[in-house]
Image (cartoon, rainbow, N blue to C red):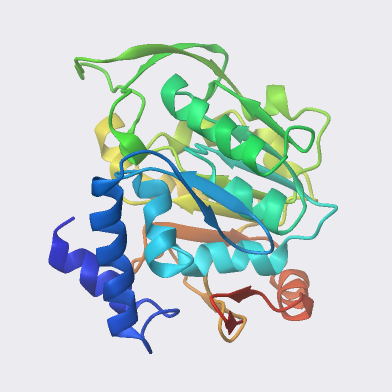
Amino acid sequence: MSLLSILKFITTHPLNKDEKLKTIVRFAKWQIGSRLVPGEIICDWINGSKFLVRNGEAGLTGNIYTGLHEFPDMGFLLHVLRSNDLFIDVGANVGSYTILACSAIGASGYAFEPVPTTYKRLIENIRLNHLENTVKCLNIGIGREPGIIEFTSDMDTENHALADGEKHANAIRVEVSSLDAVLKDESPVLMKIDVEGYETPVLEGASETLKKQTLHSVIMELNGSGKRYNFDESRILEMMSDYGFRTYSYDPLNRNLINLHGKNLNSGNTLFIRDETAVLEKLRNSPMVTIRGKRF
């Protein structure tokens, strides 16, 4: 992502658009400061939550610039989850969504991260937020069935399972399980799936999980990455529809759901919801969230 693209994104972000100069100054301070004093920095976030971040960690630095990097989806999570809910984070990376769900909101959770170096960072953020007894972290991949697959290990938020014929200098072998095997006795409410194109096997191994009526929403990244595996995203839409889910985007400022009739073309993530009326009631009855003095 070019510098101009980053600046355009952060200055037009809904939480920043009224203070563009302050936003640019914040960005510059982080860029300069994180280079002059390298190492980890603890950042205060929402409702007493925190995250540990270092220069180059795209999964967290966006939150420094904007407050909530993926505003529609993170805003949805903050409005729809309750403290007695179970959140599932598939492809947790260093844990931004898990921190919001389980520290800022107080839900319990599962966080799956297959790459050992990234998993170590996830655990550090779990410990920073005292979530050791609240979140079950598993250093495994998720797929159709148990086994071993190869992953990239040095691509930050773009680490992924290697496709047939794909080579990578620092590939690692990763244990894989299915969601149905791990969540057999659990009743999840909200799930986030960010697996860089590997969504189809994840869903194929989650048939029983997706049938559970407690699961009302799924935030899923659908950005075309499945092409590396010859997966068709239209098939994912059909699969989710078969389980009763429809596609939406969310406006956190007005707490409105927007029916998409397909995947989200304006974002990498698509929101799948079952029972729009019940979810909308949750969204509109949840407490206000405050970040950097802004309430929504």
Task: Quadrant for the C terminus, please.
Answer: bottom right
Eyeballing the image, is 258 above or below 5?
below
Q: Nearer the viewer, residue 94 or 284?
A: 94
Q: Position of residue 122 (x, y in %)?
A: 54, 34
**Visible in this render: residue 166?**
yes
The residue at the point 79 percent across, 60 percent down is 82
Q: Position of residue 18 (x, y in %)?
A: 38, 89
> Farthest residue in the front direction?
37
Q: Nearer the viewer, residue 23 or 144?
A: 23
Q: Quadrant of residue 231?
A: top left
Q: Position of residue 163 (x, y in %)?
A: 28, 23
Q: 50 left or right of 27? A: right
Eyeballing the image, is 179 above or below 12?
above
Q: Nearer the viewer, residue 294 or 191?
A: 294
The residue at the point 41 percent across, 68 percent down is 66
The residue at the point 43 percent across, 50 percent down is 60
Q: Position of residue 210 (x, y in %)?
A: 68, 42
